[in-house]
Amino acid sequence: MIIDKLENICNYSGLGERINKALHFLKQSNFKKMDSGRFEIDGSNIYATISRYQSKSLENSKWESHKKYIDVQFVAEGSEQIGYSNLNNMIVKEIYSEEKDVQFLEGEGDFITAEKGTFVIFFPQDVHMPGISILNSQQSFVTKVVVKVKID
């Protein structure tokens, strides 16, 4: 897992061409002017989904991981907590769906606060639980961009 601010993307050029394209898409886009939905950056190799939602309670959240895609999650507006744990520390709750590239897990993890302008990169071993209200108390409005980067 990597967490940083968008202004520091130059530090991650060694992560490969696809992640570079994903980070530059985030830096160059004005998400206030873009509708929610899916945007292709490089076909099925790199695509983004823009979502607008109210953050939720921890009790209404699930641990998830992916096998085919790296998640580059960017908070464009608002703030939320995101849970993190290593795959080896979790127990599979719902088996992996090849079609949706997701499996749901259970276990314990740590939580980070992702504020406006923060991106988090989750690799296949990085189990995550996004969209949680700060301090699990009050909901906030979040604009989140998730760029899916295909792993070859």
Image (tube, grey):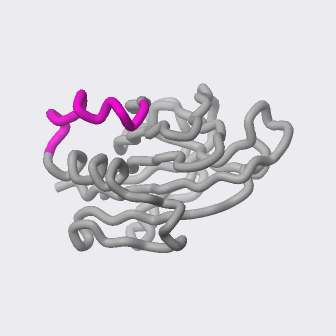
Viewer-nearest residue: 139 or 125: 139
User: Which secondary structure type mostly characterizes the magenta part of the structure?
Assistant: helix
* Identity of the residue drawn at 33% across and 65% down: 47
* Identity of the residue drawn at 17% across and 36% down: 13
- As drawn, 139 above or below 3: below
x, y percent for residue 8: 32, 30
Q: Is residue 13 magenta?
A: yes
Which quarter shows the C terminus? bottom left
Viewer-nearest residue: 15 or 88: 15
Q: Would residue 38 appear left or right of 22 to someone viewing this image? A: right
Count the marks: how many? Answer: 0
The part of the image, by quadrant, that contains residue 126 is top left
x, y percent for residue 151: 23, 54
* Identity of the residue drawn at 44% across and 40% down: 119
x, y percent for residue 72: 39, 47
- As drawn, 42 above or below 130: below
Q: Which residues are magenta?
A: 5-16
